[in-house]
Image: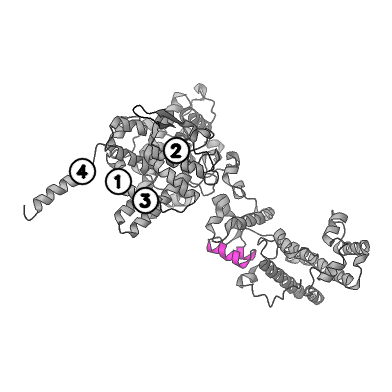
Amino acid sequence: MVLPSPLANQALTAFSSHRKIGRHHLAFYRAWLQGLDLKVAADRYLESGLDLRLARATLGWIQEALTMAARRYGKHALVRLLRLPLGPPPPETTIAATSAPSLEDFRAATDPDGFYSEAELTALYLDAHPQSHDKQARHRARLIARQLATLVWLEDLLATDPQPQDSVAAWFDDRLAARLILAGIGTLGDLQGRIRTHGYRWWVTVPRLGEKGSARLVAWLGQHTASLGTLPAQGHAPLRSISASTLQRPAATAIMPLESFSPPVALDGSRGVNRSPSRCQIDAGNDYQAIQAWLRARALSPHTERAYRREAERLLLWAILERGLALSSLTIDDVTAYRDWLGGLAQTPPERWTWRIVQSEWLAPRSTPRWSPAWRPFEGALSTRSQAHAITILKTLFEWLCKVRYLDSNPWEAVSARHAGTLSSPSFEAAHAFTRSQWRYLIDHLGTLPDDDAAHRMRFVLPFAYATGLRLAELVDARLGRLYSMPLKDELGVRWMLKVLGKGGRWRSVPMPAVVMDALRVYLTRRGLDPEPGANEPDTPLIAPLAGGDSLEPLDPSTLYKALRGFFKDAAVSLGRQGHLEDARQIERATTHWLRHTRGSHSAETMPINLIQRLLGHASVATTGIYTSTDDESLYRALDETVSAALSPNA
């Protein structure tokens, strides 16, 4: 193969003048000189992989960079040498020496430890294989040996190791660099940060990169850990293949998840002023251990554990990083300040948040994974309800710590939540429900989805969540082994029920209507499972990840939340195009919990309140009463008719 002239190579653009020579570039060039197929050499050494056009362009760019370096140092003989069209020998030479191994194979067999120089190794090769001693072969071998020796000299002058502050255009081909830059990745440090915060599927944020292209970039970064540092495990493999302990972030005294937060020794609570260590009834020497003991004792479901951990985590971080106190040293004034801090976060518009709130980065988008460096304890301003709920949980925490004698007193007993009387507006939950007409539209919109795994899952999830009114955590916790059938009393056939583990560790049974069971059988078939629930593994989740239809791994709650939110937003856009703007705005705001409220509201039209309470798993019938105590539409229609009649010209 003849090396393409750099002047004729039009593939190099303005980016190329800023590119840096790395040791992998010289290894690629050296392999080509020694006769390795260009495509194989590119796949082995370049981040662009098997793209032959880019490999040829890179070869020309490397030759030009080497030639310019030789010219700068006044090595004019080397300039001429580097411009010679070497590389793999012509076909006739290859045919004449078919019995001789390649120089690279000879190196591996004769000099695996790299004892000989390139020139010495070439001389040994020619001595060992006299069939290659024709005049042309010897001449080529000498030229290649001289170029290889030149590479050794130039490597120390040109080759650099990539650094985090380097532009991506300095290391990657022009097209790849342009795609990365368009995605907001300007430097190698930005690239590493994107991988650390987004994990294995970071590439979806980069146009036309793909999973294979991503794997090559990650592998390239892995070859330069000495200068760039290592990537976390979630950058190399999907989350489902990584253990929770591996995903845990290294301990640090910063805004970190509870399991990775490392408080200063003076503030870890081992010497908290509100402690009573001589009477303590739990094995906890500091505040973190006390919180863990509380979670083990009182959080009886994954949903409850997440809610309890979130509030304890927030208070612990705030106490140490903002207040400079251990959690077990907080006084009434301190917890009052925390209540007001939560209220200030909620009542102040984002553009007026204090420097400390913004710069401390307490906020992150919803569902940011805990392993991500972008994780923060708050997703945004807390509503009054959320503030009161947080304080209720914290009061429970401190009350328990006092019962087990870890703390002497509970400072939260003297503090009330702000505006607690406004929290239980009867129509609040009902307002977060779909009307009958909106629900019919959503069902119709299901039929417009493409025929893929995500659509098949949604065609089961939507009717399942609506019919049962399950909470988000209960939906993803549902298992096939918890389905059971019972014969009907008045006719042939069976009815299906699902056992559900709800709040407070309480079990209940909810009906699975025939239409929902039919949707489940279709969904199971799509996943490659037996359509009859009882013929599958009992621990098989009713709702599965897209990539593991036959897996026993449950779907992450945040994934289901985002899938439903995406469906609602897509439906809202479609409805808005039809001119129903107000309905579209309401559907666009909908969350997973709206399906539960919709079930309650629709059931209240025909079902006794005690049955609704049993279906939804409410501990108190007063909670269920929100669906029956008001009917805004009936009130509106009655008043509208009365007012219209009174104001009519013919009245």
Between discs 1 and 3, the one toward the N terminus: 1
The residue that disc 4 covers is: 634
Depth order, front residue of 82/483: 483
The boundaries of the magenta stretch are 159-183
Residues at marks 4 and 3 touching, judged by CB atoms closer than 8 Å: no
Marks 1/4: CA distance? 14 Å
Residue at image location 84% in from the left, 67% down from the top: 94
Give the Cα separation between the discs numbered 2 and 4: 33 Å
Instruction: Give the left or right position of residue 515, taking residue 108 as reference.
Output: left
Cα separation between marks 3 and 2: 26 Å
Frontmost residue, 332 versus 621: 621
Task: Give the residue number, with chain letter if any, for mark 1.
Answer: 436
- Which x, y percent locates residue 236? 62, 49
Marks 1, 4: nearer the viewer: 1
**x, y (%) of residue 422?**
28, 40
* Three-letter amino acid code at the position of disc 1: Arg
Check disc 2 and report its element: helix, strand or loop. helix
Q: Which amino acid type is shown beneath numbered disc 3?
A: Asp
Q: Residue furthest left?
A: 651
Question: Which is nearer the N-term, disc 3 or disc 2?
Answer: 3
Q: Secondary structure at mark 1?
A: helix
Q: Is residue 415 magenta?
A: no
The amino acid type found where label 4 is placed reads: Ser
Question: Which comes before the other along the chain, label 2 or label 4?
Answer: 2
